[in-house]
Image (tube, rainbow, N blue to C red):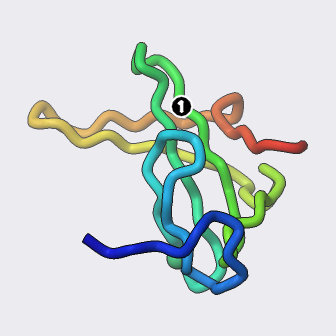
Amino acid sequence: MPVSPPAGSAVPHGDHNPHHGGIVMMKGDDLHYEVVLDPSGREYRVYFTDAVREELPASVAADVVLTLTTEAGALVIPSQAGIQSLGV
Ligand SMILES: [Zn+2]
């Protein structure tokens, strides 16, 4: 199991741990986003961070579309209200 440096590390991509209990993914070299599903399945939040996991404002994204793929097919959930970020 890979060992990540402590949160707050200044090493780019040194921290891929979820900060909000979700799943962290990368877009390009300098954007991370964490998708957190509400337990009810009715809403989700996306938190954006930069390469060293500093929080970024939700305005870094023009739009967010969540696509869930199940055995029954793809369920696309466009959301403006779902775009959230800390400290904004
Ligand atoms: Zn990364």
Q: Residue furthest top?
A: 40
Please give the residue where the numbered disc 1 appears in the rendered image.
44
Q: Position of residue 7 (x, y in %)?
A: 63, 64
Quadrant position of residue 53: bottom right
> In this rendering, is residue 74 above or below 59?
above
Q: Regarding mark 1 in the picture, which secondary structure is present there?
A: strand
Give whichever of 64, 2 is nearer the camera.
2
At horizontal 77% and vertical 58% (from top left) the residue drawn is: 55
Q: Is residue 53 left or right of residue 42?
A: right
> In this rendering, is residue 16 above or below 84?
below
Q: Name the amino acid, label 1.
A: Tyr
Crowding around mark 1 (Cα neighbors within 10 Å: few <14, some 14 to 19, many 20+) is some
Q: Position of residue 15 (x, y in %)?
A: 55, 71
At horizontal 24% and vertical 42% (from top left) the residue drawn is: 69
At horizontal 83% and vertical 54% (from top left) the residue drawn is: 57
Q: Is residue 55 left or right of residue 52?
A: right
